[in-house]
Structure formats: C-alpha cells, structure tokens
Image (spheres, rainbow, N blue to C red):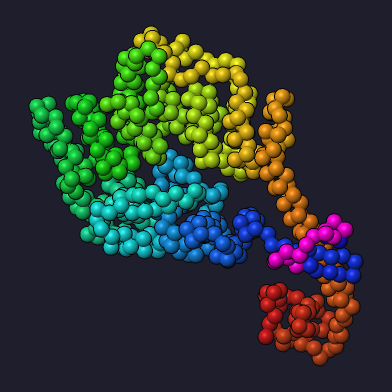
Amino acid sequence: MHIRSHGRQQQQPQMIYISSYNSVWLLSPVDIVNQVKQLLSKKEFDLALTLVKMSDESPKDREERERSINKLYAFELFKQRSFKDAMDLFLELHTDPSHVAGLYPNLLPEEFRNQIRYPGDLPVLEGVDIEGGLLCLIEYLTKKRHDLIKKDVNREVATTTLVDGSVTMKPKKQLLQIIDTTLLKCYTNDALVGSLLRLKENNCHLEECERVLKAHNKHADLITLYERKGLHTKGPKNIDLIFEYSEWILKKDPQEGLKIFTEDLDEVRSLPRLPVFNFLEKINQDVLFNYVEHVVNEWSDTTMKLHNYLCTQYITKTSALYYDYINNLPPGVKPTSAGSEPGELGELRRKTIKMLNTSMYYQADLLLKQLPQNILLEERAILCGRLGKHEEVLSIYVLQLQDFAAAERYCENVYDENDESSKQVFFDLLKYYLTPPQSSPTYASTLEPAAAAVPATSSTPSAVPNVEAALHLVETYSSYLDIVKVLDLFPKGTKLFTMFNYIEKVLSAFHGQARHSLIQKNLLKAEHLLATESYMRMRKMRVEMNEDINCKVCNKRIGNSAFARYPNGVIVHCGCIKDVKSCPN
C-alpha cells in the first residue's frame, strides 16, 4: 500500500502498519462475515467456525450461522468419503433422515429423491465407497432410531433440511418408518433383516418393504413382515373378503363404512392402500376423497398416486367454488386474497395451497394441466415454481397479482449462483418491473364456454415501468445484480439521485473488493519472495555421498542407486520412499 495514498490516514484501533525497505502496508481487520464467506468458498470449514465463534453477533444468529456452516461441512465430508464424520454431524444437526438417505443411490423412490435439494452435486458412489458408506449410514440410522424410540409416541420431531436449514415438524411415526425401511434396504445380511423385522417397534413401510423382499426372494422375511403387521393371512382372499363385506355398509352408511379403512389400528393402517383406493373408487367418490385425505394428512402416506389424486380433487373442488364466488361478487368489488375467501372456499383453498407447498410426492406437470387459466393464480405460481419455470412465476406475481413482496420472496427461495436456471431470477424480476410486456393473453378465450363467462380475476398488466419497485429491488438485493445490466435496464429519464443508495452500496462493495484484492496481491508477492529466497538457499546446499552411507529404510548401501534426501538430512533409496511428507526414523 503506497504511503502517498494513505498519508493522512489517522491511526484507528485494530489497524497495523508494516514497513519494509521501500513500502508500508496498512492491515485493517476484515468483517468476520466476509471472511467466513471467503473461507467457505475455499472449503475451510474449521477456520470458518472458529471465526463465527469470535464474532459479535447475537447468540441466536451465531448459533444459526454455525449450524449453516456445519451443514455444508457435513455435505463436503460426505463428498470426500469421510462417511463416519459426516454421519456424526448429521446426527448432531438433527438432519431429516430422508435427506441423509437420499445421498445414497436406490434407497429412496427416484421421484422423491429428485425433489430433495442439496448444497451441490451428489457424489457417484461405487464399489468400496458404497459399501463403506452404507455401513456408516446403518450406524447413523440405528442411533437415530434409538433416540426417537425414547421420545413421546405422539410427539412431533423437529428435523432440518440440508440447503436452507429450515426446521420442519414431522410425526415420530413417519420418521421411524423412513428409518426402518431404509435400514432394511441397507442390510445385506439375512440375519440382520430378520432381526429388524422381528422388532416389537417395527415401523417398516409395508408396500415398500414388500417390494424389496420380493425382489430379493427373501420369502421367509416376507412372512415375518406379514406376521408383525398382523397380516399373516395376507393374500387376495383376505383383502377380497374385506371388500365384499364392507360394500353394503359403505352404501348404507358411508361414514361408518369409511371407519373400516381409517380406524387407528395397526391392522387397518397396514391394509394395502392402492387396492383400497381402487375399491372405494368404484363404490363412492366422497368416501374415496375422505379416505385419501385421511391417509395422506393423518398417516403421512407417501404414495404418489394418492397425492396426485388429492391435489387434483382440491383443485377441482376449489375451482367450482371459486367460479360461484366470482359470479356472486357485487359490481366493482374485487376478490379477496387467496385463502381468505368466505366459508368453505377459503378453507379449501388454504388446504390446496398448503398441500402444494408441503407435499413432495405429486407430479406438478400433471396438475398444472388441470388448472383453469384465469383463476387460482397463486396455485399456478406454486406449480410453475416446482417445475423451475421462474419467469412464469414472476409474471404471475408481478403482472397479474401485482404481489411484489411474494415475487421477491420467491427469488430469495430459489436463487442459486451455481445454477444457470435460477441465478438470474432477480434480474428477471427487475425486467418485469422496468420492461413489462405491452399486452397479455386474454385467458377467457382459451376456456370452455362456462368458464369463459367468468371475468379474469387478475389486474390488467401495465406497460408503464414500475421504477419505484425496481429501486427497492436493486437497493435490497444489490449483491445479486450486475450493475452494468441494471443501469442499462433503467429508463433514460431516471433521475440519478433516485439511485444514490443503490450506487453507493455497489461502489462500497467494489471498494471493499479492491482493498481485498490489493491485500491479497501484496501477500502473494511476499509469499513469492519467501519462496524464491528459500529456493535459492536450498540450491546452495550440497550433499556429499560416499560408499559408507546406508539407506535409513532398508539399511543397504546407497552406492550408485538413485537416492532422495529429506530436509533433515536423512538419505534413502528412491524406491524406499513411502511418504514424502514423513521422514523415516
């Protein structure tokens, strides 16, 4: 750092001046948060954690940051094949067991595994890696299972995700089912499979374990599974008898008949869900809907067909009620926000939005085709988001719903600088603010005649740039946006003073980067000088050899053989070197 440029700088606390024969360096502390980000980019997790513990953040913020770093650390340990250390961290962080199992191939249904977000690409595990990894996973799942068994039966358990660290509450029963089913898939020893199935608190998922055991011809273990589930007489005749004698009850008293398949008993819970679904579909559609809603919401069933059906029914019922609601609105009165509609519509719409937001087991592309074009825009935005259609989501929030806060929340949730499809979301949102389309499609023209009579519920998109919203966006999320692209996008008539806060933030960030680069440059230069000096010093050293010098490893004479010398003077044959970093005794 040149003296001239900082000649008038007053001495500040925590500043250090370092002088040499022709230069003076000023070292000032860098904000710990920025240091942590830099260390994480270099995967220096231990040092990052040490710095966080030294920070002035509140205990709550510090704990949250430590947890976030540990999640990245655990994932990196797993990628580096340090499975034992990774599993210990996952256990400490209360990571969702399904997310841990998803790190391995073929342990979760592929459609479910694809919906789990991870901090980076999953490693490809083969051969020895998969064997060692599964052993550590078994140990992790066993410990997790032991901890859960000690908790209250009806208690919900807090688990965290690997990406955003959000805490979700899951029923203990569901977690145990995931753990036991995954353990069964991990076990290759027949004795271990049998021991797991014979446990009194066996929570294996019936259909999934049944499929795995049949695929591996483990018929004895399959019988054990049936016995523990109270289905030792399981077979086509058994379920057919239930269907035969329940049909008349379902037709006479549907509510009583429904209890046959929803009673909170192990024998009832273990009935195969899809055959029951197919049976009820032929008998009574209302009973079928109530049955599926019960097994999904109360029993946490993860069957994709059931989730697709329930979402479809929610959308169909909500659409019908919404059309009636719109038609009965007084002239000039706008519809209320999603989920706050009166009566059954509001309740049903809240269920629909919650289901679409929380379920990981439905097919968004199929549901999107069933949505009417001119209503249920919030639901459409959720489904488009699941499919990664970011521009369509932003179009709905900005142009149709004009819910700018929701658009910005969406960008926060999906932004990923390592993903080409999502790292531009903030800039895409800025484009919708400043260069909105001149016109929008008339949805009513694409609807059936009955639906076309219903007016569109969203506002007509405006072609006028929303400079105020754009300024708020660039000021709040300046670090996510390229200033050159931003300035090119703003209208030419924009007053410069209105962008003062944004430009000040960007220039401050650039100045900080410049200072960081200058310090890094000088440190690298000093390191280079030290390396050059060390190299020159080492070149001056000489090694004298004679016939009496023996190799320190094999104790044979060096003679005319190729040899190597360790920094402490120990000489060995080149062929005797085992570790270049460790000198032999």
State the count of labels: 0
**On screen, 38 above or below 298?**
below
Residue toward you, 171 or 535: 171
Q: Is residue 486 magenta?
A: no
Extreme-bottom residue of the structure: 548
Q: Which residues are magenta?
A: 4-16
Where does residue 568 sit, x and y in percent of width and height? Answer: 76, 83
Of residue 113 and residue 255, the one placed in the foreground of this image is 255
Of residues 123 and 520, the one nearer the viewer is: 520
| Vertical order, 488 against 49 (above or below) | above
Judge whether residue 9 is colored magenta. yes
Q: Quadrant of the C terminus?
A: bottom right
| Residue 308 shows up from this direction | no
How far from the left and from the top, in percent, is residue 325?
32, 18
Residue 155, position as x, y percentages in the image: 27, 54
Residue 518 appearing in the image: yes
Would you place residue 273 above or below residue 335 in this image? Answer: below
Residue 110 position by quadrant: top left
User: Front-most of 118 and 574?
Assistant: 118
147 relative position to 418: left or right:
left
**Which residue is at a point 48% across and 64% down the rendered structure image?**
84
Q: Quadrant of the N terminus?
A: bottom right
Residue 552, above or below 149: below
Residue 169 lies left or right of residue 276; in this view the side is right
Q: Main secondary structure of the magenta part?
A: loop
Q: Residue at x 44, y 59 (%)?
A: 93
Q: Residue at x 73, y 51 (%)?
A: 513
Q: Position of residue 443 (x, y in %)?
A: 47, 15
Q: Residue at x 38, y 33 (%)?
A: 353
